[in-house]
Image (cartoon, helix red, strand yellow):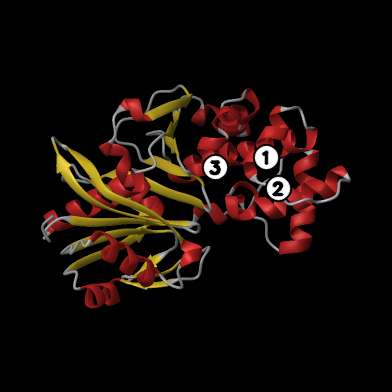
Amino acid sequence: MTGHELLVGDVGGTNVRFAMARRVDGRFRIEDFEKLKGDDFKSFDDALASYLEKTGLKPSKACFAMAGPVSKGEVILTNRGWQVSASRISRTFDIGSVHLINDFAAMARAVPEHGPEDFETIIEGTPVDNAPMLVAGPGTGFGVATLLRNRTGGWYVLNGEGGHIAFSPRDATEIELTRILLKRHGYVSNELVASGSGLEAVHEAFCEIFGRAYEEISPQEMRRLADAGDEMFLKLIKVRANTVMSAVGDLVLANGALGGVVVAGGVSERIADFLKTPEACERFVERGPLSNYLSTCPVRLMHDPEAPLIGAAAYHEQETLKT
């Protein structure tokens, strides 16, 4: 493989994914894919060195999607603490062009690169032409980005830390959950309630609410118990799904994102059936006198684990064309 091909990465709180990307027949092809556990490395640079040593690749350009706020080519991962610098990567690994972008900026930029077959409908609707599109959802954290068309026909991504907006309880169980989490954590965000990083805290709080002893169990086992009729775990998953739909509804209001919502992230995919329930869909739409504002806004779920890699490649390509 030549040194002119693009190295891409998806760097989350749990895993690090690397691959090479190139356009084939109009779409990005992901090759030489490797998934590494973040816990196995002391730093991002160590993980990257491992990938390059294993594959023998020598890329001349790279774009990495990072789970944290990027500023001036640097980022500290929100749920891992790694400090990553584009200039250091360039010097250390002799990669001429290195971009760091937020992981949900990459997720958002991937949306126009996908076809209808890559999405699952949660709520039917009609997008407003040229309106912003919201891309959001929980994985290890809770990512949020807004996708807009620019004047030249390309795409611009506005990203921030919208997952840390305060959680808004709407029923008695959620109010009690908020009380417990406030006491233990001081601030309760949508990320704390809905994401993987907050699951243990939410599980402990639900055990207190239901008067049960806390036992550490996996998300898969929680789902199995919920499907078997366990009241506590059924309610826990419902609360997380309702939180996702309530949060994205709030964000559509804030951003005017009537171009539609794309829900993404590993947690979203695992609770997709709960996102579709009438209760969860009502959480998205119900906004008192402004409920009609959201009534025709479509919500889809993205099904592509390679989306952040594709988005990183598309972002790098677009930035390169500007110069």
Q: Residue at x 31, y 62 (%)?
A: 51
Q: Amino acid at mark 2?
A: Ile
Marks 1 and 3, Cα distance to the nearest angstrom? 14 Å
223 horizontally vs 65: left or right: right
- Mark 1–mark 3 contact, CB under 8 Å? no
Disc nearer the start of the sequence (1/3): 1
- In the foreground, 320 or 291: 320
Q: CA distance from mark 2 to mark 1?
A: 6 Å
Residue 143 location (% of width, % of height): 47, 51
To which quarter of the image does residue 225 belong? Answer: top right
Q: Is residue 217 above or below residue 182?
A: above
What amino acid does circle 3 point to?
Answer: Val
Q: Badge 2 is on which residue?
A: 217
Badge nearest the viewer, 2 or 3: 2
| Cα distance in 3D space between marks 2 and 3 | 16 Å
| Left or right, 160 with reference to 26 | right
Secondary structure, mark 3, is helix
**Position in image of residue 202 (x %, y %):** 71, 50
Q: What residue is shown with label 3?
A: 267
Q: Which residue is mark 1?
A: 221
* Crowd rating for badge 3 (residues with CA inside 10 Å; few <14, some 14–19, many 20+): many
The answer to whether the residue labelled 2 contacts the one labelled 1, judged by CB atoms less than 8 Å apart, is: yes
Question: What amino acid is labelled 1 in the image?
Answer: Glu
Q: Secondary structure at mark 1?
A: helix
Give x and y (percent) for residue 85. 33, 73
- Residue at 64 percent of width and 54 percent of height: 198
